[in-house]
Image (cartoon, rainbow, N blue to C red):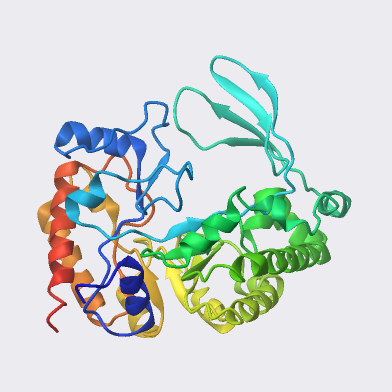
């Protein structure tokens, strides 16, 4: 067990009920969080770049390859002896439009991105970009949009792809493929907008199905080129199709507009022996879990506090789960008693296996260093207590 690296630990924990080598890991942090913690007591080995925006993600994973350009944690991981989180393999399913600046002022800029969205962003702080216009509003827009895709996948790889792929064969960290913006409702909403997507499900349902069929086929052909050279440990399908009260698409609509493409896509993944297929979905997801399982999904990330993680584990003992610790307990006014209570629940969940606990999403700047330090040291102790079982 002492010789197990982060990749070994991830796969053993996800693919068996063996809880003797659960990874100690975190998804990531806001840049401002690390800056705040430096003032509150975190020993700093490497400063966050001054140009990093406050809300920029500092990944809890090791750099995927040299000069990857990723902002990765060099401070929290060594302090707590954490394992690398899932590193993200780059992919690009955009039509690869050139970014065009439409307006540039001291306070904000407006531009079109590589997906064709018109976006307004503030320069004064990290904030969610405002989308001013979406590239697909109707069937004609979609037909024009898809003409920008071809089968020259080489241009979608990093320039040094061959050496990267070769270097990943003997890696000691877990690797994932997928995530933003690929999903069977998320991508359509990304390109149509929430309102446009919802209306088209009623006004032109065939458009939504053609959209998903096109991108399912495209991603399968594209990712086959990746998976022929790199064995990934996990695939993420991004949906974010729920809020605190539940799914904002009905179960019937998920079954009609999403499930057939899930099944086709997951059949493809199984050909490459991918054992960990996760849906990334925020919000209350209890209504959706049975559909995802039916489609072949076997993992969930994150499990936000609006869900009852204990009930989900009892109902679906085979599910693989990442996350699930409520970061709100670590805010400045959080109490050690509340953290201890949550850790007791985590301890019980760990005993069932197939669970890697950590804070959902990136750790935000309202989490204090004192509370995070207390939580992480005690979670590490809980994980260590499994080793002798």
Q: Position of residue 191 (x, y in %)?
A: 70, 49
Q: Residue at x 53, y 26 (%)?
A: 122
Q: Position of residue 16 (x, y in %)?
A: 34, 84
Q: Is residue 205 left or right of residue 317?
A: right
Q: Position of residue 95 (x, y in %)?
A: 74, 48
Q: Residue at x 23, y 72 (%)?
A: 3
Task: Assign the C terminus to one quadrant of the image.
Answer: bottom left
Q: Is 42 above or below relative to 300?
A: above
Q: Is residue 136 left or right of residue 268?
A: right
**Residue 111 falls in image quadrant:** top right
Q: Is 42 above or below relative to 25?
A: above
Q: Residue at x 16, y 39 (%)?
A: 43
Q: Is residue 175 left or right of residue 77?
A: right
Q: Is residue 48 visible?
A: yes
The number of discs equals: 0
Q: Is residue 281 visible?
A: no
Q: Is residue 113 left or right of residue 273?
A: right
The answer to which of 342 and 86 lies nearer the viewer is 86
Q: Residue at x 30, y 76 (%)?
A: 310
Task: Assign the N terminus to one quadrant of the image.
Answer: bottom left
**Residue 253 falls in image quadrant:** bottom right
Q: Position of residue 371 (x, y in %)?
A: 16, 48
**Residue 333 falls in image quadrant:** top left
């Amino acid at each position: 067990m002492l010789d197990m690296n982060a990749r070994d630990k991830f796969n053993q924990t996800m693919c068996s009920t063996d809880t003797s080598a659960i990874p100690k890991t975190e998804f990531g942090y806001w840049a401002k969080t690390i800056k705040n913690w430096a003032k509150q007591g975190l020993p700093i080995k490497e400063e966050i770049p001054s140009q990093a925006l406050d809300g920029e993600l500092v990944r809890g994973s090791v750099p995927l390859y040299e000069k990857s350009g990723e902002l990765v944690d060099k401070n929290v991981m060594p302090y707590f002896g954490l394992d690398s989180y899932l590193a993200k393999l780059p992919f690009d399913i955009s039509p690869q439009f050139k970014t065009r600046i439409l307006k540039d002022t001291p306070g904000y800029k407006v531009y079109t991105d590589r997906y064709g969205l018109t976006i307004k962003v503030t320069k004064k702080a990290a904030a969610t970009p405002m989308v001013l216009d979406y590239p697909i509003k109707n069937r004609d827009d979609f037909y024009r949009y898809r003409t920008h895709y071809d089968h020259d996948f080489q241009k979608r790889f990093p320039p040094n792809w061959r050496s990267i792929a070769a270097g990943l064969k003997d890696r000691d960290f877990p690797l994932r493929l997928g995530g933003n913006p690929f999903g069977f409702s998320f991508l359509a909403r990304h390109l149509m907008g929430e309102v446009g997507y919802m209306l088209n499900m009623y006004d032109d349902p065939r458009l939504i199905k053609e959209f998903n069929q096109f991108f399912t086929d495209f991603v399968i052909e594209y990712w086959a080129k990746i998976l022929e050279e790199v064995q990934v440990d996990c695939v993420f399908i991004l949906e974010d199709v729920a809020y605190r009260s539940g799914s904002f698409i009905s179960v019937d609509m998920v079954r009609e507009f999403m499930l057939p493409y899930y099944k086709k896509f997951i059949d493809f993944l199984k050909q490459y022996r991918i054992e960990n297929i996760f849906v990334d979905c925020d919000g209350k997801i209890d209504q959706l879990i049975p559909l995802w399982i039916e489609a072949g999904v076997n993992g969930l990330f994150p499990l936000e506090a609006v869900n009852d993680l204990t009930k989900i584990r009892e109902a679906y003992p085979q599910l693989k789960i990442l996350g699930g610790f409520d970061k709100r307990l670590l805010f400045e006014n959080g109490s050690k008693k509340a953290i201890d209570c949550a850790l007791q629940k985590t301890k019980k969940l760990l005993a069932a296996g197939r669970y890697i606990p950590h804070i959902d999403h990136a750790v935000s700047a309202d989490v204090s260093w004192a509370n995070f330090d207390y939580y992480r040291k005690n979670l590490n102790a809980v994980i260590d207590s499994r080793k002798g079982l």
